[in-house]
Image: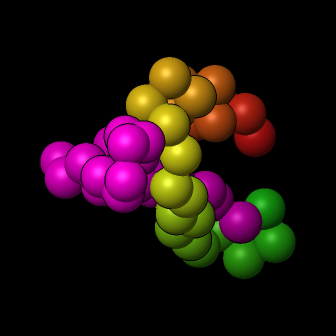
Amino acid sequence: MAKKTVASLQTSSKRLTKAIKMIKSPKSGAYTFVESVMTPESVNDWIAKK
């Protein structure tokens, strides 16, 4: 499961989006969150990767 945050970040002339991905740990079974700031075009590729 993953979700894209509502707010978009804008610096100089580049549009950036902060994406948050929830990953389940195979060892403990607990969920952790991984955050990344990237261009809106690359969000779907990043979320699809494991």
* Looking at the image, residue 7 lies above or below residue 26: above
Residue 11: x and y in percent read 36, 57
Colour scheme: rainbow
Location of residue 45 by image quarter: top right
Provide residue 9's location: percent of width, then percent of height.
30, 55
Which residue is the extreme one toward the right?
A: 27
* Position of residue 48 measured from the top left corner of the image (x, y, whole percent): 64, 28
The residue at 75%/40% (across/down) is 50
Q: Find the magenta span and give its range.
A: 1-25
Instruction: Report the magenta stretch's main SS.
Output: strand
Q: Is residue 36 above or below residue 1?
A: below
- Whether residue 31 appears in this view of the structure is no
As drawn, which residue projects farthest toward the left? 6
Residue 9 included in the magenta stretch of the image: yes
Can residue 29 be seen? yes
Q: Place residue 28 in its image quadrant.
A: bottom right
Give the vertical position of 4 relative to 32 (above or below): above
Task: Count all numbered tags in the image, as a single digit.
Answer: 0
Q: Residue at x 52, y 63 (%)?
A: 35
Looking at the image, residue 50 lies above or below residue 22:
above
Left or right: 10 as drawn, with respect to 28: left
Whether residue 2 appears in magenta in the rendering, the answer is yes
Q: At 53% from the left edge and 46% from the top edge, which residue is drawn? A: 38
Looking at the image, residue 30 sits to the left or right of residue 11; the answer is right
Q: Is residue 25 left or right of residue 16?
A: right
Q: Nearer the viewer, residue 4 or 30?
A: 4
Residue 15, horizontal then vertical, whole percent: 37, 40
Q: Residue at x 30, y 52 (%)?
A: 10
